[in-house]
Image (cartoon, grey):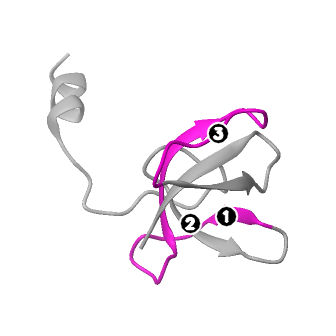
C-alpha cells in the first residue's frame, strides 16, 4: 500500500514518450501538404498543441485549426504557436 501511495503522489520529470497517438495536450508538427498533425516532443520545436479531438464531420471551435490525425482517429483541433 505504501508503494502505491508513493507512486500516486510522485511526479516524473521526464517528458512522456512519443507514441504517435494524439491526445489533448499533445505537441504536434503539421504536414501542410496532407493537412495532418503528428506528435512531437514538447521540448522540441512544434507547431501547436492539441486542444480537442473531434470526429471527421465536426468543426473545431474558433480559433483552433483542424488537422487530420495521422492515425485516422479523427481531427485534432490545434492551438497554433
Residue 44 falls inside the magenta stretch: yes
Q: Which secondary structure class fits the magenta region best?
A: loop
Left or right of 62? Residue 76 is right
Q: Which is nearer the N-term, disc 2 or disc 1?
A: 2
Foreground mark, 3 or 2, reads 3
Give the image location of residue 60, x and y in percent.
58, 43
Tell me the crowding category of disc 2: few under 14, some 14 to 19, or many 20 or more residues within 10 angstroms, Cα based.
many
Classify mark 2: helix, strand or loop: strand
Classify mark 3: helix, strand or loop: loop
Residue corresponding to mark 3: 59
Quadrant (top left/top right/bottom left/bottom right) for the C terminus: bottom left
Between the C-alphas of marks 2 and 1, the distance is 5 Å
Between the C-alphas of marks 1 and 3, the distance is 19 Å
Q: Pick the residue in front: 42 or 75.
A: 75
Left or right of 57? Residue 23 is left
Question: Outermost residue toward the bottom?
Answer: 45
Classify mark 1: helix, strand or loop: strand
- Residue at left 42%, top 50%? 25
Q: Which residues are magenta?
A: 35-63
Residue corresponding to mark 2: 28
Q: Pick the residue in front: 9 or 19.
A: 19
Question: Outermost residue toward the front?
Answer: 62
Residue corresponding to mark 1: 38
Tell me the crowding category of disc 3: few under 14, some 14 to 19, or many 20 or more residues within 10 angstroms, Cα based.
few
Amino acid at each position: 500500500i505504501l508503494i502505491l501511495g508513493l507512486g500516486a503522489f510522485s511526479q516524473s520529470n521526464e517528458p512522456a514518450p512519443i507514441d504517435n497517438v494524439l491526445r489533448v495536450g499533445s505537441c504536434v508538427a503539421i504536414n501542410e501538404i496532407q493537412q495532418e498533425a503528428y506528435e512531437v516532443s514538447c521540448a522540441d520545436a512544434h507547431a501547436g498543441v492539441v486542444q480537442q479531438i473531434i470526429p471527421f464531420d465536426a468543426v473545431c471551435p474558433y480559433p483552433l485549426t483542424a488537422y487530420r490525425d495521422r492515425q485516422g482517429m479523427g481531427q485534432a483541433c490545434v492551438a497554433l504557436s
